[in-house]
Amino acid sequence: MPQTRLTISTRGQGLYEFTDEAARFVRTAGMEEGLLTAFVRHTSCSLLIQENADPDVKRDLSAYFARLAPPADDPSMDYLVHRLEGPDDMPAHIKSALTQVSLGVPVSAGRLALGTWQGLYLFEHRDRSHRREIVLHLSP
């Protein structure tokens, strides 16, 4: 069963699309039908399938999650204990827990069976740059 790893360099919080890389992996594997599993190997970012046509969707999602889990130094977050890695770390773990670290996408006729406006995204929850690793696994 084919497997590969992608490394995505982030520049802080936001959504980073990797649909093209995943589609290229599926094409190269030559599997007509199956399931692509994407798994991110980190606890302060997550994966999403989301609209990839209107950039306002990405901005609104980022704004919503910023309001949902603001930095630990915000007065509304004074109950947090884990603060060793900075004020963005525990909120990043909360955001990751509310989303997902793995996705499954059917493969049909040798292509990802995504809808017209769907894309695969790494959702970075930390402020500083990171190198995030995603494992792509294709199974029949």
Image (spheres, helix red, strand yellow):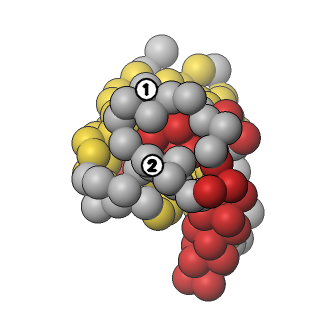
Residue marked by disc 1: 41
Task: Please report the residue visible at 27 percent of the width from the left and 46 percent of the height from the top.
Answer: 130
Q: Amino acid at mark 1?
A: Arg
The circle on residue 88 is 2
Name the spot of residue 3 as percent of width and height, x first. 40, 23
Task: Please report the residue visible at 65 percent of the width from the left and 29 percent of the height from the top.
Answer: 34
Q: Badge 1: how crowded within 10 Å, few (<14), some, or many (20+)?
A: some
Give the left or right position of residue 129, taking residue 89 as reference.
Answer: left
Q: Quadrant of the C terminus?
A: top right
Q: Badge 2: how crowded within 10 Å, few (<14), some, or many (20+)?
A: many
From this viewpoint, is residue 3 visible? yes
Classify 61 as above or below 99.
Answer: below
Judging depth in this view, the residue of 17 and 57 nearest the camera is: 57
Task: Please report the residue visible at 64 percent of the width from the left and 48 percent of the height from the top.
Answer: 77
Residue 32, quarter of the rendered image = top right
Name the spot of residue 62 as percent of width and height, x first. 59, 67
Judging depth in this view, the residue of 8 and 129 nearest the camera is: 129
Give the left or right position of residue 65, taking residue 74 as reference.
Answer: right
Q: Amino acid at mark 2?
A: Asp
What is the C-alpha distance between the residues marked 1 and 2?
A: 19 Å
Q: Residue furthest top?
A: 1
Dot 2 falls on a residue whose secondary structure is loop
Judging depth in this view, the residue of 49 and 23 nearest the camera is: 49
Name the spot of residue 59 as percent of width and height, x first. 58, 77
- Which is in the foreground here, disc 1 or disc 2? 2
Dot 1 falls on a residue whose secondary structure is loop
For marks 1 and 2 on the same chain, the one whose residue lies earlier in the sequence: 1
Total number of numbered discs in the rendering: 2
